[in-house]
């Protein structure tokens, strides 16, 4: 194993990366709190500043993926539309099968320059998560309880608020509403059968209401939705598929038409996945969008800023020889490790919600 490989496997390095993430994240959350003063005076400035502050947090996780783990994500796309990515607003429909699909999504956002402003229709529980969840509050992320009767008003209102957002953004919807498990798949296929829809082999049945209101709220109100970004993600090499072409004429505003369009799309996605397992490739031209240095530079900035006081503190503590101080320090590290472990747990499917498991019984 080379020296870099050795460092990557060391717990102490993981601890330091987490330290930088937590401390910088909390500092940024704190600054975000102060930016609220701007909201009544200059809303657009508030939004622009928060996009940059959010970038400082989310880009650290992207740095981990692209620089630390050395992962590249491949885009299978139509080269004609490639130049539009990041230059226009878009609704992104991404399948939700894996634990780090959000990180691969962020990776593409970074490479197309929309990471700071990226948005998602996310479950409400994520808004309580320290650092990322709190950061999302300032980005005007749309949260839902996944109970349509309760969500209808708030989701529509939040979407309408985004009409005059001053930065280009991608709005992500995982239409399945939950991550894939065998049990959820079986139940959702029962629903598909009851609705007379074709069965899907690799996807849960999409929920259509969130998508329909997103299309309704973000069209004809100043926002362009020119690209149809349909992402397919696979587990073992983070390959992705994406097709982009004009959407305006294709998606109807009527909810029923929207719903039919979405079901057809998932049937197409299922066929792409089947094709991938058969041939090892997706339709479209594979492109790896170029790296940008900013995620690494941002991380180095925070590392320099925060590691120096940490080491100084450590040296002072060791010199002081006080066992109480050392014990308190060890206690803080244990608490922080448990906190990070809990945050990572949020991404784990086996700790996921029961949404989609027992719905038939409830409804
Ligand atoms: C180049 C580009 C490439 C890549 C870039 C990719 C992405 C980058 C972009 C942005 C990144 C930004 C941020 C990402 C970072 C992190 C975020 C990651 C993840 C967070 C995501 C989540 O939290 S997912 C969970 C929350 N989101 C959703 O649920 C969205 C989808 N859901 C909906 O739209 C729902 O309709 C709803 C939530 C609005 C309402 O929920 P409710 O449960 O009330 O649903 P419905 O009323 O729709 O359900 C009832 C209908 O469904 C039928 N039914 C019943 N059981 C099932 C079942 N098991 N499966 C399917 N359908 C079922 C039922 O019959 C009802 O039918 P109707 O005919 O009445 O509709
Ligand atoms: C430099 C970085 C250092 C990293 C150390 C800290 C790691 C912290 C990791 C925090 C990750 C937070 C990202 C949250 C996004 C999770 C999205 C997600 O996967 O949500 C699930 C829902 O969609 C559906 O939920 P289920 O109904 O399946 O249940």
Image: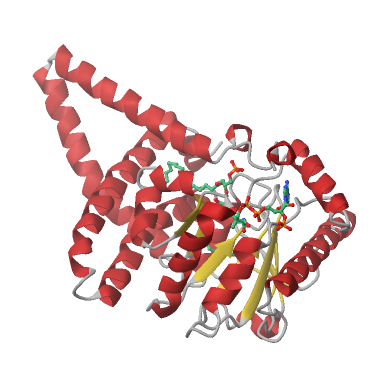
Question: Is residue 200 among the parts visible in the rendering?
Answer: no
On the image, the x and y values in percent for residue 54 come to 36, 60
Residue 20: in sight, yes or no? Answer: yes
Q: Nearer the viewer, residue 245 or 64?
A: 245
Quarter holding residue 181: top right
Give coordinates of residue 204: x percent, y percent. Answer: 75, 50
Corner quadrant of residue 233: bottom right
Q: In the figure, 354 relative to 255: above or below?
A: above
Residue at image point 31% right, 48% down: 25
- Is 359 left or right of 156, judged from the image as shown? right
Question: Tag count in the figure?
Answer: 0
Task: Locate the N terminus by quadrant.
Answer: top right
Between residues 28 and 133, which one lies in front from this camera angle? 133
Quarter of the rendering containing residue 92: bottom right
Q: Tell me, what colour scheme is on the image? A: secondary structure
Q: Residue furthest left?
A: 320
Q: Is 87 on the left or on the right of 263, as rendered? A: left
Measured as percent of width and height from the top left, residue 120 is found at 51, 60
335 with respect to 3 (left or right): left
In the rendered view, would you say 272 is above or below 88?
above
Quarter of the figure that contains the C terminus? top right
Q: Residue at x 27, y 26 (%)?
A: 332
Q: Residue at x 42, y 68 (%)?
A: 117
Residue 329 x/y as whole percent: 23, 24
Q: Nearer the viewer, residue 17 or 40?
A: 40
In the picture, measured across the screen, residue 57 lies left or right of residue 212, that is left
On screen, 116 above or below 128? below
Seen from the viewer's position, the closer of residues 197 and 325 is 197
């Amino acid at each position: 194993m080379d020296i870099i490989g050795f460092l990557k496997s060391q717990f102490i390095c993981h601890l330091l990366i987490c330290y930088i993430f937590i401390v910088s994240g909390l500092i940024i959350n704190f600054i975000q709190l102060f930016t609220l003063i701007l909201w009544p005076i200059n809303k657009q400035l508030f939004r622009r500043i928060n996009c940059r502050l959010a970038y400082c947090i989310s880009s650290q996780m992207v740095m981990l993926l692209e620089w630390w783990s050395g992962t590249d994500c491949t885009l299978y796309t139509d080269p004609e539309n490639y130049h539009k990515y990041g230059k226009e607003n878009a609704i992104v429909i991404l399948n939700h099968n894996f634990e780090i699909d959000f990180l691969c999504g962020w990776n593409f956002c970074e490479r197309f320059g929309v990471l700071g402003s990226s948005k998602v229709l996310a479950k409400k529980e994520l808004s309580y998560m320290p650092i990322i969840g709190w950061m999302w509050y300032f980005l005007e992320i749309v949260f839902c309880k996944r109970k349509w009767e309760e969500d209808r008003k708030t989701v529509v209102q939040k979407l309408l608020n985004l009409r005059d957002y001053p930065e280009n953004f991608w709005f992500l919807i995982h239409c399945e509403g939950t991550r894939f498990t065998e049990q959820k798949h079986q139940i959702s296929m029962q629903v598909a059968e009851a609705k007379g829809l074709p069965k899907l082999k690799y996807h849960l049945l999409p929920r259509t209401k969130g998508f329909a209101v997103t299309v309704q709220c973000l069209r004809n109100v100043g926002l362009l939705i020119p690209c149809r970004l349909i992402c397919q993600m696979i587990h073992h090499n983070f390959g992705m598929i994406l097709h982009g072409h004009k959407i305006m004429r294709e998606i109807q505003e009527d909810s029923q038409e929207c719903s039919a369009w979405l079901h057809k799309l998932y049937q197409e996605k299922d066929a792409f996945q089947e094709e991938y397992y058969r041939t090892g490739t997706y339709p479209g031209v594979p492109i790896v969008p170029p790296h940008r240095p900013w995620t690494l530079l941002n991380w180095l900035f925070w590392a320099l800023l925060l590691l120096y006081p940490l080491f100084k503190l450590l040296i002072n503590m060791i010199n002081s020889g006080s066992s109480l101080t050392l014990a308190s320090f060890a206690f803080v590290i244990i608490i922080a490790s448990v906190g990070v472990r809990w945050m990572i747990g949020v991404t784990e499917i086996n700790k996921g919600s029961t949404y989609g498991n027992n719905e038939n019984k409830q409804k």
